[in-house]
Amino acid sequence: MVSKKKPATKAKKTTPKVTAKAKASPKKATAKPKTVAKKALTAKKPAAKKTVVKKPVSPAKAKPKSPNTHFEVSEFTPYKIKRGEEYMNEAQRVHFKNILLNWRNELMEEVDRTVHHMQDEAANPPDPADRATLEEEFSIELRTRDRERRLIKKIDSTIEQIAKDDYGFCNSCGVEIGIRRLEARPTANKCIDCKTLDEIKEKQLGA
């Protein structure tokens, strides 16, 4: 008996599974940083220096001397005291005599200057509005000149004391007045202690 062949079984076609590939999302192009064109820095021009024009300095005007200027001794070279020298020797007497003579000459010149000034003003009378002011000025000057004349007399008396060798000693107690005190006030006739006592007494009497 012939055996019947079994019909061959058809092989099943295996359809290959298509695995869906995930769509690659397109990469976003990273934005390139914008290159901002820098403006070229222009060098600043140096600020022009201001030329300051200096005004010519006018010569200083001489200030008028105050009325009390000549009541003090003008400048002089202080006496250099030597060790062991006698008080009020010849050199010291000459030193103070020269101070007093120079001081006297300055006062005399000031008196003459004031007299000439008053004569010139009197020759040219001012307006009535300025007359009161001028009279007041004359009154002040006359009082000042009167003080200067009295001081000149005191200087003359002091020069006589130098000639008699009586200069430099206190009239109250007889002690030495001192070189430095006499240079500060050449007409002084009392030591600093006696002068201070006199001033205290005057204040007490005045009170």
Image (cartoon, rainbow, N blue to C red):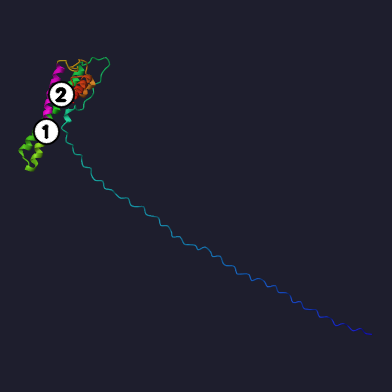
Q: Is residue 15 left or right of residue 40?
A: right
Kind of residue at badge 2: Leu
Q: Where 8 falls versus 54 (above or below)?
A: below
Identify the element where label 2 is drawn: helix
Q: Main secondary structure of the magenta part?
A: helix
Along the line of sight, the residue nearer the viewer: 7 or 109: 7
Residue 167: quarter of image: top left
- Find residue 92 and report its horizontal and vertical position in percent: 21, 18
99 within the magenta span = no
- Find residue 200 and report its horizontal and vertical position in percent: 21, 23
Say which residue label 2 marks: 101
User: Could you classify mark 1 by the number of other residues whose Cα lies within 10 Å: few (under 14), some (14-19), or many (20 or more)?
Assistant: some
Along the line of sight, the residue nearer the viewer: 48 or 29: 29
Q: CA distance from mark 1 to mark 2?
A: 23 Å
Magenta region = 141-163
Residue 126: quarter of image: top left
Q: Where 24 falls versus 147 (above or below)?
A: below
- Res 141 label: 1
- Res 60 label: none
Q: Is residue 160 left or right of residue 16?
A: left
Farthest residue to the bottom: give it. 1
- Find residue 8 and report its horizontal and vertical position in percent: 84, 81
